[in-house]
Image: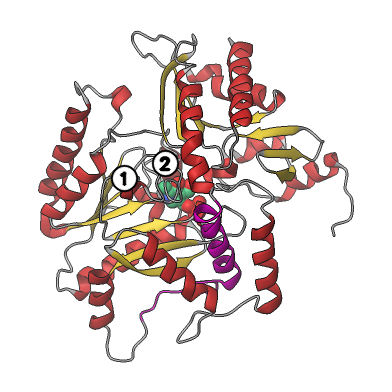
Amino acid sequence: MLSPIHPDELAALDRAHLIHPVAPWRLHEQRGPAVLASAKGAFLTDNRGHQLLDAFAGLWCVNVGYGQESVVQAATEQLRQLPYATGYFHFASEPAIRLAAKLAELTPASLSRAYLTLGGSEAVDAAVRFIVQYYNATGRPGKKHFISLQRGYHGSSSTGAGLTALPAFHRGFDLPLPTQHYIASPYPYRSEAADDAAVIAASVAALRAKVAELGAQNVAAFFCEPIQGSGGVIVPPVGWLKAMQLAAHELDILFVVDEVITGFGRTGPMFACEAEGVQPDLMTLAKGLTAGYVPMGATMVSEKVYAAIADAAPAGAPIGHGATYSGHPVGAAVALEVLRLYQQGGVLANGQRGAAHFSAGLDGLRDHPLVGDSRHRGLLGALELVADKASKRAFDPALGLADRIFATAYRNGLVFRAFGDHILGFAPALTFTESEFELLFQRLKKTLDDVL
Ligand code: PLP
């Protein structure tokens, strides 16, 4: 146990020493941290004793809610029995093998092999490396260019951050690489397309045009999120994912679906791909895989890609990709229990039932003077704030509206996430009850009214 420390002293240590991910470092030093101390169910408590309803499942990951004893037990038992086992060479642990088999069973039929990572960024990074190997192995070494969506997020590894198309992840990092390219995101609220079919057609046309511009012989893959999360919870029309898969395959490029957020029941089914019968060549997973209890991700790979890489390697020579913690047994044991909770524990079904309360609550705020758009699928949703509903004009960023909303919500006992200055994102745990949804929207409405 750590010895007790005063919150002010802890804040001073934070300002002096801890580098925060995706934070304005200097501003943070002035403001100091919000230190989370404990959690149970849907609620967090900070180290000053303030209770918060977590409408974002941590960082869209704690899908099973906090304090699931069976998950704690799975981790504890694994820590006692075998806290570490390398996956290098021919070693393995039972949880890692069973998890790979379970993921092969749950993910679309096109995916049969699992490479287990520590999170989403590493899963994306592995996908890129496998794709490069695949084309070198199949005698098409020119296919090295990658296409992804504007406003897409694919983590912050040194290559993945270039597939990400958000300015903060490029600024000062010399990204994107010359091999990384973007097409417009399918963003119905901000699209000039007349209807959903036109939004889909515009995306397909943009992909075709980008491949034609680069030359199909030079393009390796198209990466996308089924719903763009960090770009502002941009929900494409139903049918978009399938249309993009068909186009990618016609264009002879690999189709990679990043389900780091949308996986594990977040949008309703176990995976967003399932809803549209999409069969990707690779899929990246993390977050809900272990519900954030310990770090773990996965890169799912088709047999075609796996076999090409495996067969091209010189006999007996290792394929040089791996890390000390690949397939960590504690992560794998936790993931197996979390997957059991989704299925046998009824968590997935509860999330599907909760989606009706969630969508009704968000849509109920459409008429609020600050709100231009509400959008959602399953338990993933957003409100987009506008200064003028008719013209959809955004608020002047100098107003710091999102910052004010976030601070007011915190005081009102609610946390979610703001994207830029105008989008509020929500991703409650799949375990939310009806009364927790009521509390969410009561506190959210009060917050919006308070900042009016
Ligand atoms: N891909 C997507 C779609 C994500 O949303 C994220 C993280 O938010 C990542 C990849 C990166 O995952 P991680 O933060 O676990 O590295």
Element marked by disc 1? helix
**Front position in the image: 322 or 371:** 371
Element marked by disc 2? loop
Q: Which quadrant of the figure contains the N terminus? A: bottom right
First in sequence: mark 1 vs mark 2: 2
Asked whether residue 321 is drawn in magenta, I would say: yes
Give coordinates of residue 382: x percent, y percent: 46, 28
Q: Is residue 340 above or below residue 38?
A: below
Queried on whether the Cβ of the residue with tag 1 lies below 8 angstroms from ligand 1, the answer reads no
Residue 52, quarter of the rendered image: top right
Q: Residue at x 51, y 28 (%)?
A: 357
Coloration of the structure image: secondary structure
Asked whether residue 370 is drawn in magenta, I would say: no
Q: CA distance from mark 1 to mark 2?
A: 9 Å
Give coordinates of residue 256: x percent, y percent: 29, 55
Amino acid tagged 2: Thr
Q: Is residue 404 above or below residue 247?
A: above
> Can the viewer see residue 174 in this picture?
no
Q: Residue at x 20, y 68 (%)?
A: 135
Residue underneath mark 2: 267
Amino acid tagged 1: Ala
Question: Would you call the spot at circle 1 few (<14 residues within 10 Å), some (14-19), or many (20 or more)?
Answer: some
Question: In the drawing, does residue 439 fall left or right of residue 5?
Answer: left
Give coordinates of residue 43: x percent, y percent: 69, 38
Residue underneath mark 1: 275
Question: In the drawing, does residue 7 fall left or right of residue 166?
Answer: right
Q: Is residue 7 above or below residue 385?
A: below
| Contact? badges 1 and 2 (CB < 8 Å) | yes
Q: Which residues are magenta?
A: 319-345
Residue 308, quarter of the rendered image: bottom left
Question: Would you call the spot at circle 2 few (<14 residues within 10 Å), some (14-19), or many (20 or more)?
Answer: many
Q: Which quadrant of the figure contains the C terminus? A: top right
